[in-house]
Image (spheres, grey):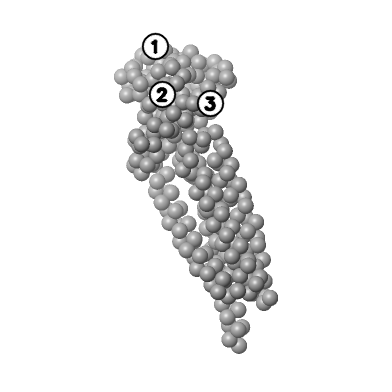
Amino acid sequence: MAVSNNIIATINFIALICSIPIIITGIWLASKPDNHCIRSLPWPIVFIGVLFLLLALTGFIGAYCNKQGLLAFYLFCNAALIITGIILLILAYIVTHPSGAYSVPGREYDEYRYMGYSEWLRDHITDPENWGSIRACLASSSICKKMVWASYTAPQFFAARISSLQSGCCKPPTVCGYQYVNPITWINPTNPMGDVDCIIWNNDPNELCYNCDSCKAGVLGNLRREWKEANVILIIAVIILICLYLVAFNAYKNTHKGAKK
């Protein structure tokens, strides 16, 4: 096996190993309770990891077995994946850049404004067709119930760093002026017209604020955070692919030069 092929085989063997953490990360994200009701994020990461693995395997076999046709196919697929990855990064940045999070005086946690998120996220994730199943899933989950298990006093709750889902779905907006009883029981609003969600709030554990815009905003806030974490993985993958392509292309070119001599 030529030195150039040795280089390609070695690099792709390393890439093969690197693809495994990407796949594991996708499976880990899918298993997180916060993502239980939304399956649109983790599996694309697994898909990217599998493509990465198959590409590295193709390059390794092509180099190890000196299959020039397979190496040419590998280079073409590598270039296509790099372009696709860059496009995905740009689109993900545009979609996830707007944030509906805002701080509330006297609260450690943020609250979330539905219209603060991108139109694409609102139309594709929390549209009426999808929201019914997401709402039902949230209501049957332990996302809100586990806050009650923590037995917060009012000062402890206001100082807690609760998730965007818990902030948006498990309690009414602060502007409503509800009095705290426990994390999912609030009474006597002093400003019931302060927000449209104020009159939607219900102390029934199966209702809470699951029909509120703030709950939809909390879901989008959680999704935005997870996508930003996924973008880091995608950036690393694209950088590795570019490095692989440059080294493999030069090695492939040198192999052809050597063959002509």
Residue extending furthest toward the bottom? 261
Q: Which residue is mark 3?
A: 142
For residue 186, which quarter of the picture? top left
Q: Which one is closest to the eye, mark 3 or mark 2? A: 3
Position above or below: 145 against 79: above
Identify residue for label 1: 188
Q: Quadrant of the N terminus?
A: bottom right
Q: Nearer the viewer, mark 3 or mark 1?
A: 3
Q: Which residue appears at 62% of the width and 50% of the height?
A: 21
Please tell me which residue lies in front, 44 or 18: 44
Q: Earlier in the sequence, mark 3 or mark 1?
A: 3
Q: Earlier in the sequence, mark 2 or mark 1?
A: 1
Closer to the camera in the image, 175 or 36: 36
**Residue drawn where x is 61% and y is 70% of the image:** 62
Residue 17: percent from left, percent from top: 65, 56
Quadrant location, the C terminus = bottom right
Q: Mark on residue 209?
A: 2
Q: Report the amino acid beneath label 3.
A: Ser
Toward the top, the furthest residue is: 188
Q: CA distance from mark 2 to mark 1?
A: 16 Å
* Amino acid type assigned to the residue bearing label 2 in the image: Cys
Give how far apart the Cα atoms at labels 3 and 2 are.
14 Å
Which structural element holds mark 2? loop
